[in-house]
Image (cartoon, rainbow, N blue to C red):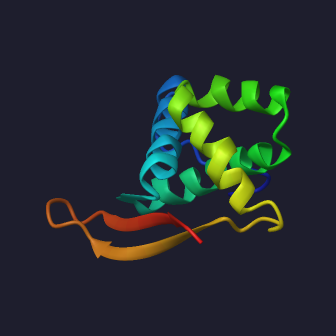
């Protein structure tokens, strides 16, 4: 049963999952959209929304927290200078997931994660 699950582990070890989510978030921040599987897009959406909420604060502690998760200075700078300012007045819901259909090779459900 699904009672009180905190997160979807996506069949990965902890460190692998953290790097995959950071990679999805970095790709979204740098390129404004990411095409991936549906499960990874939904997990990346939750992860990125939390980072944007930190970026809206704009203080040094929030910047250090985001850098500790992303490990990419260019992505952190863009997140705080452009994206955080863009969503300053929005209370959540910064991203959307659009289904793209099955992948040709293995039939996995693909989705596009993008900013609203």
Find residue 106 and report its image quarter: bottom left
Counting from the top left corner in percent of width and height, residue 70 is at: 57, 31
Residue at 77% of width from left, 65% of height from top? 92
Left or right, residue 12 beside residue 91: left
Given residues 60 and 20, the one toward you in this image is 60
The correct choice, above or below, for 58 with respect to 87 in the image is: above
Count of marks overlaid on the render: 0
- Quadrant (top left/top right/bottom left/bottom right) for the N terminus: bottom right
Residue 41: give x, y in percent of width and height.
49, 58
In the rendered image, the quadrant that contains the C terminus is: bottom right
Q: Which residue is drawn at 46% across and 47% down?
A: 30
Query: Of all residues shown, which one is farthest toward the left?
Result: 105
Q: Is residue 59 above or below residue 108?
A: above
Q: Quadrant of residue 51?
A: top right
Q: Can you say whether 15 is above or below 39 in the image?
A: above
Query: In terms of depth relative to the viewer, which is nearer, 103 or 26?
Result: 26
Residue ID at (77%, 56%) = 3
Residue 29 is situated, as x and y percent measured from the top left of the image, at: 52, 49
Give the image quarter of residue 105. Answer: bottom left
User: Is residue 32 toward the left or the right of residue 69 in the image?
Assistant: left
Q: Can residue 49 be seen in this view?
A: no
Decide if residue 1 is on the left or right side of residue 61.
left
Q: As rendered, which of 7 and 59 lies closer to the eye? A: 59
In this rendered view, identify the residue nearer to me: 47 or 59: 59
Residue at the image point whose x is 64% and y is 54% from the top: 83
Q: Where is residue 17 in the image (x, y as percent from the top left)?
A: 51, 34
On the question of residue 82 being in view, the answer is yes
């Amino acid at each position: 049963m699904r009672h009180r699950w905190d997160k979807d582990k996506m069949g990965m070890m902890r460190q692998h999952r953290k790097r995959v989510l950071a990679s999805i978030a970095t790709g979204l921040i740098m390129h404004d959209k990411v095409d991936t599987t549906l499960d990874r897009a939904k997990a990346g959406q939750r992860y990125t929304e939390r980072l944007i909420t930190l970026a809206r604060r704009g203080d040094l502690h929030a910047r250090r927290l985001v850098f500790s998760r992303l490990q990419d200075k260019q992505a952190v700078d863009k997140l705080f200078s452009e994206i955080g300012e863009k969503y300053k007045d929005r209370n959540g819901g910064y991203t959307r997931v659009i289904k793209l259909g099955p992948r040709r090779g293995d039939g996995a459900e693909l989705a596009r994660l993008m900013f609203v």
